[in-house]
């Protein structure tokens, strides 16, 4: 069974161009599923039926796994079985009639505009690291990029004169995202005064954001610096890697941006993913309804 998993992961990497982190997630989830089957004395995937999968889901729930994590595990299993049936390794897909757990799509805490301002003021601009971090925070809030997209930006991806950047998102899809004047100023300041110090003479490395060792900054470092500055700004909310991305989307929609444009900037393949942000400001929606509906 493990060999089939490896073939599946290779397919995801080569033909679907999924990221390394996504592949790791699939591997981890399927490893748990195969162990469950083995512990249930099922030694071949052709022996599996729908009940085996649903029982596995219940075992995850009993183990304290959240509904979101259970849904992710089921999604991995369903994609895996679809692959096996398409490749004619299996004749039937036992997961086809299983629905994902009904989830209330909840996003992490969104920062208010004032909280974002406090966060952006937190770095010490007298140091190279502070200038870098200021540029990172300004860019993240101005563009709504995923952390994985931001760490992989090169200097050439930023087009100052045109006022936009180019990034490669999920599934190796390219998109163009506008840059605000504040983020442009912060990035230029970083490139002029801080990046040369961090590069340590390593001019061949074209990544935009560098670590103190002169290498590409890691996703973990991105996450840690955002959390560090949130604490410095005395923000009490639960800060996560995508907090600025969520705040970016929410603030745009609150100020009247249309859903399709926000979807494009976020790089969402499905607009239903973007719609999770529309529940944030119910008071604004009520006001719009009251002001514009003929029978409020």
Image (cartoon, rainbow, N blue to C red):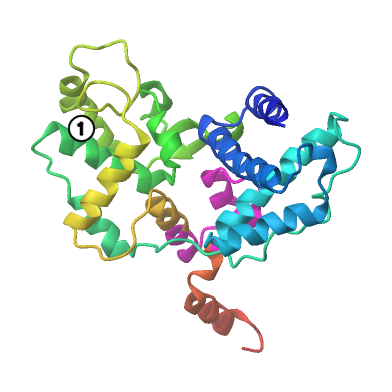
Residue 202 horizontal side relative to residue 35, left or right: left
SS category of the residue bearing label 1: helix
Q: Residue 50, relative to residue 284: is it above or below?
A: above
Tell me the residue at 40%/35% (across/down).
150
Tell me the residue at 78%/40% (across/down).
81
Queried whether the magenta region covers residue 44, the answer comes back as no
Which of 278/293 is in front?
278
- Quadrant of the rendered structure where residue 118 is? bottom left
Percent across and percent down for residue 145 are 44, 42
Percent across and percent down for residue 268 are 59, 46
Count the labels in the image: 1
- Chief secondary structure of the magenta span? helix
Q: Residue 45, relative to residue 289: is it above or below?
A: above
Q: Quadrant of the N terminus?
A: top right
The residue beneath circle 1 is 189
Queried whether the magenta region covers residue 272, the answer comes back as yes
- Quadrant of the rendered structure where residue 16 is? top right
Percent across and percent down for residue 41 are 74, 44
Q: Quadrant of the C terminus?
A: bottom right
- Magenta residues? 250-276
Which of 296/6 is in front?
6
Tell me the residue at 73%/38% (across/down).
80
């Amino acid at each position: 069974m493990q060999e089939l998993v490896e073939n599946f992961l290779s397919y995801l990497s080569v033909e679907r161009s999924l990221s390394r982190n996504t592949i790791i997630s699939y591997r981890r989830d399927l490893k748990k599923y195969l162990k469950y089957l083995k512990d249930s004395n099922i030694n071949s995937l052709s022996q599996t039926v729908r009940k085996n999968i649903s029982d596995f889901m219940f075992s995850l729930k009993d183990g304290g796994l959240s509904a979101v994590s259970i849904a992710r595990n089921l999604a991995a299993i369903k994609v895996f079985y679809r692959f096996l049936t398409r490749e004619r390794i299996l004749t039937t897909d036992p997961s086809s009639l299983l629905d994902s757990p009904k989830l209330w799509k909840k996003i992490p805490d969104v920062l208010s505009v004032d909280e974002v301002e406090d966060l952006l003021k937190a770095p010490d601009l007298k140091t190279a690291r502070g200038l870098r971090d200021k540029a990172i925070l300004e860019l993240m809030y101005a563009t709504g990029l995923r952390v994985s997209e931001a760490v992989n930006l090169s200097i050439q991806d930023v087009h100052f004169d045109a006022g936009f950047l180019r990034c490669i998102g999920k599934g190796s899809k390219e998109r163009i995202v506008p840059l605000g004047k504040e983020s442009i100023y912060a990035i230029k300041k970083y490139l002029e005064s801080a990046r040369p110090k961090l590069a340590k003479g390593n001019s061949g490395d074209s990544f935009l954001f560098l670590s103190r060792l002169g290498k590409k900054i890691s996703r973990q470092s991105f996450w840690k610096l955002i959390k560090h500055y949130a604490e410095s700004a005395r923000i009490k909310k639960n800060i996560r890697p995508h907090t600025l991305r969520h705040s970016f989307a929410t603030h745009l929609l609150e100020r009247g941006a249309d859903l399709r444009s926000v979807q494009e900037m976020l790089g969402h393949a499905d607009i239903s993913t973007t719609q999770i942000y529309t529940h944030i400001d119910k008071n604004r929606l009520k006001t719009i309804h009251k002001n514009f509906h003929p029978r409020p």
